[in-house]
Image (cartoon, rainbow, N blue to C red):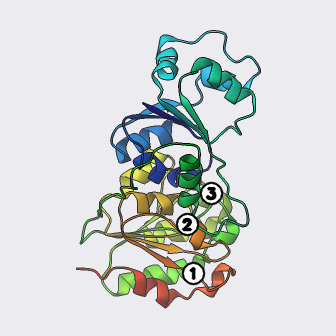
Amino acid sequence: MNVIFHYGALGDFVLTLPLLRSLTGPTTLVTSWARASLASRLVPGTTPMDIQMWEFLRLHTKGGPTSVSPAIGDLFSQARSIISFISTGDDDWADNVARLAPDAKRVFIDPRPGEDWEGHICGWHRDQAAGQGLKLNKDNRPKPTGVKDGPVVVHPGSGGVDKCWPVERFEAMIDGLTARGQSVVPLLGEAEVERWPKDVLDRWRDTYSARVFGTLDELHGALPQACAYVGNDSGPTHLAAQMGLATVALFGPTDPRRWAPVGPNVTVLAPEAPAAMDWLDTDAVVDACPQPG
């Protein structure tokens, strides 16, 4: 059995799924419960566990937990490999895991590559894992999904404000898709509800029937009936790609050679060199979306 420990932003988490798919045998994923349970639905053979459990939190303290429950004891005793995105390998966490799972191969992955890394982040993960002796299968990407006559799901947000395409261009894109007979479902996250002026939120709700997703389950549930997804460099965009949906990803200041979504049907719109998001015009995004019918 493999055990993966991860804790980070949604996009960073989704970009670990290709590594999860390449492991041999069953895997227990220890992260936030919402993300772990989502991964168990996307990647067969994955068992979710909540990283907020007291015994896991104690792994970060010197000496760690003095005793563990039978379930946690079995997790460590049965682990063939333990893959950590949360430890450097020379800290209290690593010492505690070595004590609890002395027979397991321990692999420590730095989640962020250095400036000299020129490949994709998923390649960075694989190189580190393979370099520490972990045997990996070929990355089995998800199969294409989506409903041919379904709507285009549009999410205009991102954790980084500078990664967001201007709101008025999203609106023009939605108008353009609607004019050619395409159904559109705009989704707003908590960041948009907090950042956007009230009049803009009201316009998106009243004019575009925008829906607000408050949980990862709600986001996941909104995607399977779509024909395509359009969004910025963000966690939801990476999720749509990993779910196999036709995904149009809008890039500007970040480098898609490193951070592009991974999936069977991804179109990346990016400038030749990093630039502000206003580089991208509306027609290019409309043209990149699948035609209705």
**Mark 3 lies on residue:** 191
Marks 2 and 1: in contact by CB < 8 Å? no
**Mark 2 lies on residue:** 202
Identify the amino acid type marked 3: Ala
Instruction: Tell me where residue 196 sits by quadrant.
Output: bottom right
Crowd rating for badge 3 (residues with CA inside 10 Å; few <14, some 14–19, many 20+): few
Residue 49: horizontal and vertical position, in percent?
A: 48, 30
Residue at horizontal 66 percent and vertical 15 percent from the top: 65
- Image: 238 above or below 42: below
Quadrant where the image shows the C terminus: bottom left
Crowd rating for badge 2 (residues with CA inside 10 Å; few <14, some 14–19, many 20+): some
Residue 17 at least partly seen: yes
Residue 77: horizontal and vertical position, in percent?
A: 49, 18
Crowd rating for badge 1 (residues with CA inside 10 Å; few <14, some 14–19, many 20+): many
- Tag in front: 1 or 3: 1
- Image: 146 above or below 89: below
Instruction: Tell me where residue 223 sits by quadrant.
Output: bottom left
- Estimate the spatial distance between the alpha carbons at disc 2 and disc 3, rounded to whole Å: 15 Å
